[in-house]
Every structure is written in C-alpha cells, then in structure tokens.
Amino acid sequence: MEKTKKFLLQESELPTKWYNIVADMPNKPQPMLHPGTKQPLKPEDLYPIFAEELANQELNQTDTWIEIPEEVREKYKIYRPTPLVRAYNLEKALDTPAHIYFKNESVSPVGSHKLNSALAQAYYCKKQGITNITTETGAGQWGTALALAAKIFGLELAVYMVKISYEQKPYRRSLMQTWGAQVIASPSMSTKAGRKTITENPGYQGSLGTAISEAIELAMSTPNCRYTLGSVLNHVSLHQTVIGLEAEKQMEMTGEYPDIVIGCFGGGSNFSGISFPFMRHNIKEGKKTRFISAEPASCPKLTRGVFQYDFGDEAGYTPLIPMYTLGHNFAPAHIHAGGLRYHGAGSIVSQMMKDKMMEAVDIKQLDSFKAGVLFAQTEGIIPAPESAHAIAAAINEALKAKEEGVSKTILFNLSGHGLVDMSAYDQYLAGDLINYALSDEDISKNTDKLEKIV
C-alpha cells in the first residue's frame, strides 16, 4: 500500500478552545510587574494598552481552556486546519531512521502562523469598539498578518517595522500596504522613543524592542487606539495553540507520537503553539517528549542570556517580565531571520526553561540557510529564514538518531514560507552571508546593567 504523506483534518475538527498551559504548570511564571510601582500586574493595569479581553487572557492562570469565539473560528476556516506532512524525501536525503513530520503553517493567506493570533486580537479590539490599533514587526510576518486581520474586522493599523527589515524585505512592506496598513520604518521621528534612539545612535538599523516602544507610545497617545503584539506575551501563545491541538489529532492519524517537538524561537509564539498541547501530556501523564527551541546564534537569549526581570521594549513602556534576556538595550546583528531578532523570551517559556521542561539550541545563520535549501530541494517548500532554524535543529536530531541507530519521531513547525525572502536566499547562494559571533563581554555589557528585582 502506498504511504500517505499528508495528514488532513476536516473543517469540523478545528479546535473550539485554546489551551492555557499556565493552569497546568507545576511552577507558574513569576508575576509580571508594573513598570512604575514594581507591583504585580492586575488586568486593569493593561487596559490602557490592550483590549480588555486580551489583558484578562494575559493574566489568566486558572482556566485550562479558553473558548475560541465563533467569529474567529469562522475566519480560521479560511485556511485551517493546516496539513501535517511526513517529510519522506528529507528523511531519505539524510539517510536517517528518524521519522520527520512538519506542521505546515505556511498555507495561511499571509504565509505564516501569525494570523492565528492576529485574527483573535483584531476581533477582541473590534468587539470593544476600538477603531485604531498599532503594532511592531521584525521580518514582517506579524505585520502582514495583522494588516489582513485589521482589514477583515474594519480597523485602522499602524505598523512600526524594524528598519533593517523594512529595507531587506520590501515585499512584506508591500503586502501590509496592500491590505491598508500604514508602515513606518523604526526607529522613526514620529515618536519620542524613536527620536531618542536616532539622536543617540543616528545609524541604528532598529530592533523589535525599539519598534515595540514606538507602537506602544503611539497607541497610548491616540484616542480609541490599542496596541497589539505578535509574540512573547501569554495571550499570543494561547491563540497559537490551535497549531499543536490540530497536530495532536494528526499525529494520532499517523499512528505515532513525537519523541521530539521543535520550533524556531524569537519571542516564543510558534514554539508555544506547536509545543504546549503536547507538553501538557508530559505534565499530566508523565510522557517524555523533548521540546527544543531553535534560536539564532546571534541572538541567544535562551542559551546564553540571564533569567531576570526585564522590559519587553527598549524604552521601558512595557511591564517588567520575568524572562531569559540579553538586555532590552541589546542590538542584534542584521541577520535575515528578522522575526528572531528579539532580546527576550516570554514568561511562560522562560519558566519552562528554568524548570528544565524544554531545551534550547542556537543555530548559526549559514547553517540555517543550508538547512532551508536542503528542505526546499527535498520537500519543495522554500522556508522562511526563521523556520529554517527549526529545520536545522530537526536535521541535527535526525542525524543524531542515525549515529545512535535508533528511530525517533520528530515533529517541527514550519511557521512560514520564504517566498518574499528570496533576496536573503540570493545572498546566501552568492556566498554573501556571514555568521555573527557574540562574545560573553558583548552579552554581559547589557545584562549587567539590568535592575536586579527578586
């Protein structure tokens, strides 16, 4: 009998609830703190910045399952459930006994997993009567997702796009503008935070931390406007669990269960989405699945950062988050995986790293593109540079299985395609990309300045 390569769910099998892993965690994350009072946050502290329902979801530590609004589920049905695929050709190229599966989030209209949370956040803003929203974006995947979601729900959107990505990825900018968003290169002269950055460092090419500061400042100074975020925070991870909840059902169809689950890592949204539903079985049933986050070697907060309260943005507008961080003033190298160029990790994932519930590996830029090219040549999909980090980690685990002579079932999240990242592949194929090295001194000069909060 011919092997089935693609595993599909019916529309009726789309999850009806998101999974809130915090309710099941043996050690819950330390509380986020108000940036002024340094006291634990209450939902109402976040109401001036976020839609109220999102603020409530952010701090919800008791409800294991959160209902997905019917309006959001209907929009999910445009592209969900997404396929689970057995990567037979990649396995063959590696000559590995491992079975490699990937959840293909690149089939969404915007080409990435980011729409899962963008639709939810736009819906809650619209429901509250909010008319304007702001956000930041690195590589542009989140910005494009929110641009489409804002158009669907009739909201006006301003996007601060990290300047280096604004220049490297013009087609992502074009996508946002096509869907009606205003796109501003960050740092900009339109906010106090941006002007301060430009004045202190005129040639600065931007970071997600700076872009977040600008987006929050605009939201707080504009009537009937709220800020939305594409990663890091708990409610974003919550919305992304539709990925893993679907993958659970699809893995049952294969007759296998993952020994290893992998996602690339910037702030944690797609890693959380693929991992958390499977992680609950480790917590509640004693399963031994390994969870591996793959971050860039040039921005290694999980592998080389410190666990410390820190701001999620550069200017200090956000709450203080208990996170693994390189310091909110960290200036990441200009790698093409712009969505992974973030100084910190979300509080849930950080607590899991602290408790050794998951692992982290760092991937060099050239290794990620090498893996991306191999994946394209074997499976036919050109991955986003961010997703190529997860592919590289999956390849490494498959080769270890070969060396050990054991079969492993590996699942990774293909968080997005790279069809608007071809300039990066052009540079890689021409030999123009390099790896970036960080010394311990480079890291400590930022982390040593962080205020120590117990």
Image (cartoon, rainbow, N blue to C red):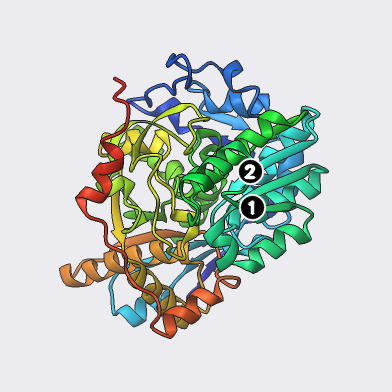
Instruction: Identify which amino acid the numbered label 2 is placed on.
Output: Thr
- The spot of residue 189 in percent (x, y) is 63, 46
Q: In front: 431, or 248?
A: 431
Q: Can residue 229 be seen in this view?
A: no
Residue where numbered disc 2 is placed: 135
Q: In this view, does 50 lie above or below 342?
A: above
Q: Where residue 205 is drawn, which disc sits there?
A: none
Q: Name the residue under label 1.
A: 143
Crowding at mark 1 (Cα within 10 Å: few <14, some 14-19, many 20+): many
Of label 1 and label 2, which has the lower sequence position? 2
Q: Quadrant of residue 433?
A: bottom left
Which residue is at the front of the view, 317 or 8?
317
Q: Are marks 1 and 2 in contact (CB under 8 Å)?
A: yes
Taking the image as shown, residue 88 lies to the left or right of residue 71, namely: left
The residue at 61%/35% (across/down) is 216
* Residue depicted at 34% across the width and 73% down the height: 434
Position of residue 80 relative to residue 135, above or below, is below
Q: Quadrant of residue 361?
A: bottom left
Q: Residue furthest bottom?
A: 430
Residue 165: give x, y in percent of width and height: 55, 61
| Crowdedness near tag 2: few (<14), some (14–19) or many (≥20) residues, C-alpha within 10 Å | many
Q: Is mark 1 on a helix, strand or loop?
A: helix
Image location (x, y in percent) of residue 439? 22, 55
Please say whether residue 313 is visible from this viewpoint. Answer: yes
Identified at 56% across, 57% down, the residue is: 163
Q: Position of residue 408 (x, y in %)?
A: 29, 62
Residue type at mark 1: give it.
Gly
* Label 1 – label 2 distance at C-alpha: 7 Å
Secondary structure of the residue carrying numbered label 2: strand
